[in-house]
Amino acid sequence: MRIGHFPVSRRMLGRMAIGASMASFTPFPARAASAPAPRFSVMAWALGHDIPFERQLGIISQAGYQGIELTGEFRNWTKAETREAASRIRGHGLVVDAMAGVRTGFAKIGETAQFLTELSQVIESAVTLECGRVILVSGPVAPDMAPAEQQSRVAQALQKAAELAAAASIELVIEPIDRFENPTCFLTGARQAKAILQQVNKPNVKILFDIFHEQRAYGNVLETLELLIKDISLIHIADSPRRGAPGTGELNFRRVYSELGRLGYHDWIAMEFYPEGDPVPPLVTARHQAIEAMSRQPTLGTGA
């Protein structure tokens, strides 16, 4: 995730471009169709900061997605405007599957009260927008504190946050950010997030597995997914190193999606890449590629 935002349209895309994109996916033997299918959303900011909200909704709906993710667009909305936004989102056949907007990181030592105040405000908006998941980022490393001590403080802050969120039936997902994007970030990888979850020990605190950030920070995406899959309730998609559409960078997304299918992942997958040109065709292609690959299993285990 990044801090920012973008817009949308309705159903018209021809199937020729979709068919061409699907042809590049080598078929695997089909897997048993018993697990529920994942749902797909788009992080609004990645569409572009200058696109109006209504246009964002249109793009995402036209591309066949079920959800939109927000990063703080709602902060300046009045309560009436937030209710109106919820109605417009429903009118496009979408839900808000996750939203960020807590500016103070949960790892900022001495600012837990401010973090919780901001979280309360975001939760209030989340309830109005009928969103059940809030994304949290950590903020900076404390330079004068041992990492173990800071992690203990982080766990305490997240325990309080979890109790606050649980009262509104909200799930919290903590998102690691790689240090190429934020050199001072405390939480930089999914395995570190798992260690934090073990200390927090709250059922409504999970991991947001951002494949772009994880690849840039540590690589080894497939093994980490397998290790942590039960703690992941949201996955963000963008290719590394330039946050392009899947297939434009260094990752083998067919293998990533196939592994998610093998592991039985069925929660939300959000596209957070920069689409080139008209955003609808690349979003359609990305969704179809994911669905196709997740419905198959490889005959041979090969790395991503």
Image: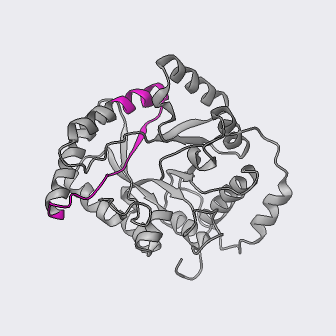
Relative to 134, 297 lies left or right: right
Is residue 83 placed above or below 164 in the rendered structure? above
The residue sitting at 56% across, 43% down in the picture is: 5
- Could you say where residue 197 lies in the image, as x and y percent from the top left? 26, 55
Image quadrant containing the C terminus: bottom right
- Could you say where residue 274 lies in the image, as x and y percent from the top left? 63, 56
Rendering colour mode: one colour
Is residue 37 placed above or below 89 in the rendered structure? below
Is residue 115 placed above or below 39 in the rendered structure? above
Relative to 27, 227 lies left or right: left
The residue sitting at 57% across, 21% down in the picture is: 84
Q: Report if residue 144 lies within the magenta region.
A: yes
The residue sitting at 19% across, 55% down in the picture is: 199
Relative to 133, 144 lies left or right: left
- Could you say where residue 282 lies in the image, as x and y percent from the top left? 71, 57
Tell me which segment is drawn in magenta.
121-147
The residue sitting at 57% across, 26% down in the picture is: 85
Q: Pick out the residue farthest to the top.
A: 80
Q: Report if residue 286 lies within the magenta region.
A: no
Residue 297 in view here: no
Residue 156 in view here: yes
Relative to 4, 158 lies left or right: left
Q: Looking at the picture, tell me which residue is in the foreground, 35 or 48.
A: 48
Is residue 131 placed above or below 211 in the rendered structure? above
Q: Looking at the picture, tell me which residue is in the foreground, 214 or 24.
A: 214
The tally of labels here is: 0
Q: Looking at the picture, tell me which residue is in the foreground, 153 or 63.
A: 153
